[in-house]
Image (tube, grey):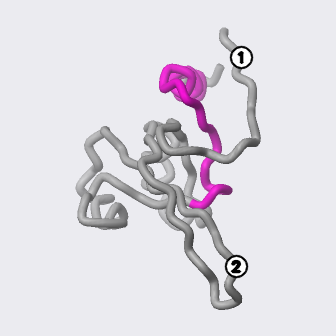
C-alpha cells in the first residue's frame, strides 16, 4: 500500500481535500465529507471583531450532494460549495488519487 506523507503547509487553490466538520452535530454530514473529495476553489479571509484574520477555504464537490444535506452547502449561489477552516481539513494533496487511497483504506479498514 502506498504511504502518504503528511505536510503541514497551508492548503492552496487547486488542492484536493478531505474535511470533517468541527462540530459533530450532523453525523450524516461528516460521513459525506469523510467519504468525498473536494477541491479548494478560493480562499477567503474572515476578520473577527478584534481584527484577527482567519482563512476560510471554499471547497467545491463534484459529487452529487444528498438532498438532506443541500441546505448545508449554501456558502454562495452554488449549492456544491462549502467553506472550511484549516483545522477542518484533515487531508490535502495536489493529487486526487492520493486522497482516493485514504478513502479506500478507511472504507476497508486497512
Say whether marks 2 and 1 touch (CB < 8 Å): no
Residue 96 magenta:
yes
Classify residue 98 by image quadrant. top right
Q: Residue at x 61, y 45 (%)?
A: 11
Q: Residue at x 57, y 52 (%)?
A: 20
Question: In the rendered view, would you say 54 is above or below 65?
Answer: below
Q: Which residue is mark 2?
A: 52
Residue 8 shown left or right of residue 69 in the figure:
right
Which of pointers 2 and 1 lies earlier in the amino acid sequence?
A: 1
Q: Position of residue 103 (x, y in %)?
A: 53, 28
From the viewer's side, name the closer residue of 15 and 81: 15
Q: Quadrant of the N terminus?
A: top right
Q: Secondary structure at mark 1?
A: loop
Q: Quadrant of the C terminus?
A: top right
Q: Residue at x 56, y 44 (%)?
A: 12
Q: Position of residue 47 (x, y in %)?
A: 60, 79
Q: Position of residue 59 (x, y in %)?
A: 44, 50
Q: Nearer the viewer, mark 2 or mark 1?
A: 2
Q: Residue at x 60, y 61 (%)?
A: 85
Classify residue 86 by image quadrant. bottom right
Report how far apart the C-alphas of labels 2 and 1 lie in the structure: 37 Å
Q: Which mark is residue 3?
A: 1
Residue 49 magenta:
no
Q: Crowding near pointer 2: few (<14 within 10 Å), some, many (20+)?
A: few
Question: In the rendered view, would you say 75 is above or below 51?
Answer: above
Write down the region rendered in magenta: 85-106
Residue 37 shown left or right of residue 53 in the figure:
left
Amino acid at each position: 500500500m502506498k504511504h502518504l506523507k503528511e505536510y503541514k503547509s497551508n492548503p492552496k487553490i487547486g488542492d484536493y481535500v478531505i474535511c470533517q466538520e468541527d462540530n459533530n452535530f450532523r453525523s450524516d454530514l461528516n460521513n459525506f465529507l469523510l467519504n468525498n473529495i473536494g477541491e479548494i476553489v478560493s480562499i477567503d479571509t474572515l476578520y473577527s471583531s478584534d481584527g484577527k484574520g482567519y482563512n476560510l477555504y471554499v471547497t467545491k464537490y463534484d459529487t452529487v450532494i444528498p438532498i438532506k444535506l443541500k441546505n448545508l452547502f449554501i456558502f454562495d449561489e452554488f449549492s456544491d460549495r462549502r467553506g472550511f477552516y484549516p483545522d477542518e481539513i484533515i487531508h490535502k494533496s495536489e493529487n486526487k488519487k492520493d486522497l482516493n487511497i485514504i478513502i479506500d483504506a478507511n472504507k476497508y479498514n486497512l
